[in-house]
Image (cartoon, coloured by chain):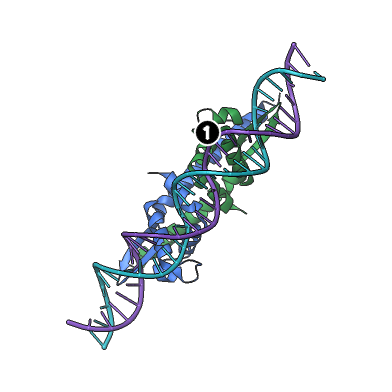
Chain colours: A green, B blue, C cyan, D purple
Amino acid sequence: MGTYGALAALGDPTRRLIFERLTAGPLAVGELAAGLPVSRPAVSQHLKVLKEARLVRDEAVGTRRVYRVDPVGVRELRDYFDDIWAQALAAFARAVEEET
Amino acid sequence: MGTYGALAALGDPTRRLIFERLTAGPLAVGELAAGLPVSRPAVSQHLKVLKEARLVRDEAVGTRRVYRVDPVGVRELRDYFDDIWAQALAAFARAVEEET
DNA sequence: CGACTTCGTAAGTGCAGACTTACCGTTCGT
DNA sequence: ACGAACGGTAAGTCTGCACTTACGAAGTCG
């Protein structure tokens, strides 16, 4: 359960929207739901998925739950594409080399 | 368009499998399909999505089509998560600061 | 303690999209 | 030129999952 959960999570457009709103700063569930084209329970369900993917963290403050971006999952994805990027470059260099 | 197509593409487990096999080196469609739990046409359909997301490139060689990782889409995703990673760190630093 | 807010979960519905089989175009070898 | 290999596309099926409404739990304030 590494990067796949995170990629699957961000594969959904609504989840990506929620996630990106959180990159601008912490928000409670209700605040997130307002301005989104889906109901508040839907947002809760999406947040659960994002949380399991370690892309967000939540904190209880009073009767509200404040969500923010979790660096852990983000770092995982960044490293993942960093590796692949390096591999792709190396493969390309090798291909150029073999142009006789 | 941009990173969304790429994220949506890699959200599917089969597509992620195909993509990761290609990171090891170029492969033809048939070679990809062998060893995958789905039919060859399914692989073709997935490749189409990956191609539209600029995550793979294809090249006709004889009657075969060789697919390889396209650096363009990969770089896009790497930069995307790089930004968010930086933002998340900054937000965290700010939060620590406010611990009176 | 009761009214109110905020949110998570249960249960049910509808649709996108990941599969399949069947078919056709293209390219190569003989 | 014919057969075979390779792969893209059409058409149809079916399952997962993104939604909804309804409800309940936990917390806050008077």
Q: Quadrant of the C terminus of chain B?
A: top right
* Residue type for callout 1: Arg
Residue drawn at (44%, 44%) of the image: B4
Up-down relation of residue B82 to residue B33 (above or below) = above
Percent of width and height locating residue A59 = 68, 33
Residue drawn at (61%, 37%) of the image: A44
* Mark 1 burial class by Cα count in 10 Å: few <14, some 14-19, many 20+: some
Q: Can residue A21 be seen from the camera position used here?
A: yes
- Whether residue A87 sits left or right of residue C6 in the image: it is left
Front-most of C11 and B64?
C11
Percent of width and height locating residue B59 = 33, 64
Front-most of A15 and B79?
A15
Front-most of D5 and B78?
D5
Percent of width and height locating residue A24 = 53, 31
For disc 1, the chain is A
Percent of width and height locating residue B63 = 30, 72
* Total tally of numbered discs in the picture: 1
Q: Can residue A93 be seen from the camera position used here?
A: no
Residue drawn at (50%, 28%) of the image: A35
Up-down relation of residue B81 to residue B22 (above or below) = above
Residue ID for mark 1: A21
Q: Quadrant of the N terminus of chain B?
A: top left
- The kind of secondary structure element at disc 1 is helix
Residue drawn at (40%, 65%) of the image: B41
> Residue D9 appears in which quarter of the rendering?
bottom left
Up-down relation of residue C9 to residue A92 (above or below) = above
Up-down relation of residue B63 to residue B98 (above or below) = below
